[in-house]
Amino acid sequence: MTGATLTVDLAAIEANYRLLKDRSPTARCAALVKANAYGVGVERVAPALRDAGCRVFFVATVDEAIALRGIIGAEPEIFVLDGLPVEAGDAFEAHRLTPVLNDLGQIGRWTERARTAGRALPAVIHFDTGMSRLGLPEDETRRLMDCPAMIEGLNVAYLMSHLVSAENPDSPLNGRQLEAFSAIRAGFPDIAASLANSSGVFLGPRYHFDLVRPGVALYGANPRPGRPNPMREVVRLRARIVQVRRIDAHRTVGYGATHRFAAPATIATLPLGYADGYLRSLSGRGFCYLGGFRVPVVGRVSMDLVTLDVSSAPPELVFPGAEVDVIGGPVPIDDLAEAGGTIAYELLTALGARYRREYVSGDIDE
Ligand SMILES: *Cc1c(COP(=O)(O)O)cnc(C)c1O
């Protein structure tokens, strides 16, 4: 077997979906499958989620939505977060996609189209309560609340907003956004509402409204940083050592000679690098496990290779072809992300195209 193997546990994704759903008993549970299902592989992930009972999917772009419609069939709802591009109206109707309308201009265009078509068109309306990114800003929100007739002709499935700091339950922003969103919602009492992402699910029932929108927790990342991870592990990356070198004291390893050994050392080289999403920021900071021994990344991560200091592992474990845990198992993805100064979202969405990918249902073999 060559190189590196990425194993994705679809049963774990389904279990994670059910856990999030059980945590939000009064709401429906959507699944966020933007960016190729967070890098995990939407073609396999979306059908698994559908099998677990998911009927509402969010993607970022129209192109992702069209691809997803081909994967999951006609029935599930597909909501497109990036809104309604001027030229995309036909595609939305042809593939039965629902735009998340992010400003009054988009609302105007969609209602105009509904009028021309002579029938109600589906929509989600996104209000900005603090992210300052997408969604109706405050002044547009006020105008819409003063004149709800602006959305006549639309079949509004949900009012939504997005939490800024849900992963930090102590942040006062959570309560402030909840209050702002509740006030907006009170203006449209007949329309369902959605606020919570993965971490928002764990902020409690007041945040759940009628639909929760988890993404990263489905893929095994911890929605409650600093506390035990309630999610099941989904992604496991293992690689085989390609070369072992024993080097003398005072030698350096890798580009820039950033790491110099004080004592003789054993280095193992793995066949993956930043081109595979093993981020360069893990240089000198990342770690792997070899047969139960923690082995640190030493020197710079290069495009196709990573070097590990395996001096602490018993020599009989260190040989070309020996398997190393890179992500998952003893290397929780959240911990590795933290070591690299990033978050699990970025490690997941960067997962490389060169890995051999295996999709399994049931525990990833140890
Ligand atoms: C990506 C996204 C989510 C999911 O967030 P997670 O933190 O991955 O659960 C929910 N809502 C919106 C608007 C998003 O863009």
Image (cartoon, rainbow, N blue to C red):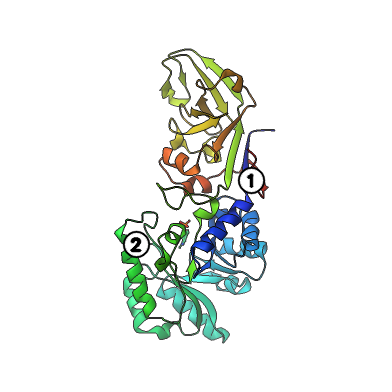
Kind of residue at disc 2: Asn
Q: Would you say 317 lies left or right of 216 here?
A: right
Q: Is residue 36 above or below residue 145?
A: above
**SS at circle 1:** loop
Cβ atoms at labels 2 and 1 below 8 Å apart: no
Residue mark closest to the camera, 2 vs 1: 1
| Place of residue 284 in the rendered image (x, y in percent of width and height, measured from the top left) | 43, 30
Instruction: Tell me which corner region of the image, top left, top right, bottom left or bottom right, holds residue 171.
Output: bottom left
Separation of marks 2 and 1 at Cα, in angstroms? 36 Å
Residue labelled with disc 1: 363
Question: How far across and down, in percent of the image, does residue 350 sit?
Answer: 52, 45
In front of the other: 50 or 257 = 50
Of the image marks 2 and 1, the number of the one nearer the N terminus: 2
Secondary structure under tag 2 reads helix
Q: Which mark is residue 152?
A: none
Which residue does the image show at 56% across and 87% down from the upper left? 118
Disc 1: CA contacts within 10 A as few (<14), some (14-19) or many (>=20): some
The N terminus lies in quadrant: top right
Q: In the rendered image, which quarter contains the C terminus?
A: top right
Q: Residue at x 59, y 54 (%)?
A: 13
The dot on residue 174 is: 2
**Residue 96, image x and y in percent?**
61, 73
Q: Is residue 125 above or below residue 280?
A: below
Residue 272 percent across, percent down from the top left: 57, 34
Decide if residue 33 is in sight here.
no
Q: Quadrant of residue 276?
A: top right
In the figure, is residue 65 to the left or right of 263?
Answer: right
The residue lying toward the viewer, choosing from 4 and 192, is 192
Compared to 306, does 348 lie above or below? below
Extreme-right residue of the structure: 1
Could you tell me the amino acid type at mark 1? Answer: Asp
